[in-house]
Amino acid sequence: MVEAELKVLAGRSNPELAQEIADALKLQLGGIECRRFSDGEISVKISENVRGSDVFVIQSTSNPANDNLMELMLIIDALRRASARRITAVIPYYGYARQDRKVEPRVPISAKVVATMLEAIGVKRILTMDLHANQIQGFFEIPVDHLFGASVLVKYFKDLSMPDLVIVSPDSGGAERARFFGKRLGASMAIIDKRRERANESEVMHIVGNVEGKNCILIDDMIDTAGTICKAALALREKGALKIIAAATHGVLSGSAIQNLIGSPIDEVVVTNTLALSAEKKFPRMKVLSVAPLFATAIQHIHEEKSVSSLFL
């Protein structure tokens, strides 16, 4: 059997990351014509031959989530109808991931709905990074390769060689993540415990762990409106923390996030480029790390049927 040719295509959600991944693989991005009709409908066309190819489609389902998700679905359907041998959806940021369970009656499990849609349209494999909830992997009946942005973030912080380092989780749910970073960086750990003492009173931030005179890294999987992480940073400063760095894989940065971060005591914000960051979402205290080499290596391993487990740590 003739070996399938590796092809990398991308939607319009994050063209810079897609180009970086293609460059790392020493490939040209495959041609896709995407346009929008006057009534808002999306139209796509694959502008090259993909018959018998092993195709990887790069598309984060980020804001505007519905448009990017629909574009991904249409690209996959076009590839399937063009006789691609295997289609892998590379989704650096998996939208709807926070809707991963029923938190009240009569609501959908939207992360599962997205998984069902992707499978139904013909995807054979998923490659993603830092899902908001690990159980989302179980929503799929196809293989899911789940990369971690921690390897990129840990390397950056190791190079900084910060003394007296404490890894801080902004809530109890992120304790495992903070513990992992603490082990890798040889740092101690602290947790922000949020409590509302009485009804109609603001939350009180209790810090479990010693941060006085320490350099602190607030770690989370994403920074959305930045409200929680900014409040946590303020609590750390009040307890005598020195340098405070906020770090996350996904820089969602919606709503008033940038204003919140600029007005906070956070000295540096570190995110990766799983989502495209416009000029309006960048400011001098922000550092953006690239995950392109990690995704490129994963794509190469999957194409060559090699193990990717070494990339998960």
Image: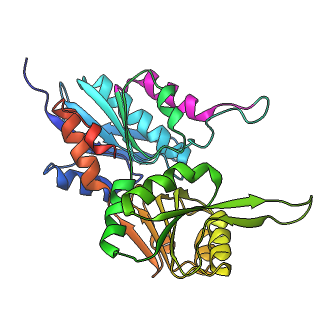
Percent position of residue 129, x then y: 41, 46
As drawn, the residue found furthest toward the right would be 199
Q: Is residue 114 visible?
A: yes
Magenta region, residue range: 107-124
Residue at the image position 23 percent from the left and 23 percent from the top: 85
Relative to 32, is 215 above or below?
below
User: Magenta part mainly helix, strand or loop?
Assistant: helix
Q: Nearer the viewer, residue 7 or 253?
A: 253
User: Does residue 46 appear in this view?
Assistant: no
Q: Residue at x 31, y 23 (%)?
A: 81
Question: Looking at the picture, how far across and down is residue 170, in whole percent?
Answer: 61, 61
- Pick the residue in front: 130 or 245: 245
276 or 194, which is in the foreground?
194
State whether residue 150 is above or below residue 119: below
Name the side, left or right, on which 198 lies relative to 96.
Answer: right
Q: Is residue 110 magenta?
A: yes
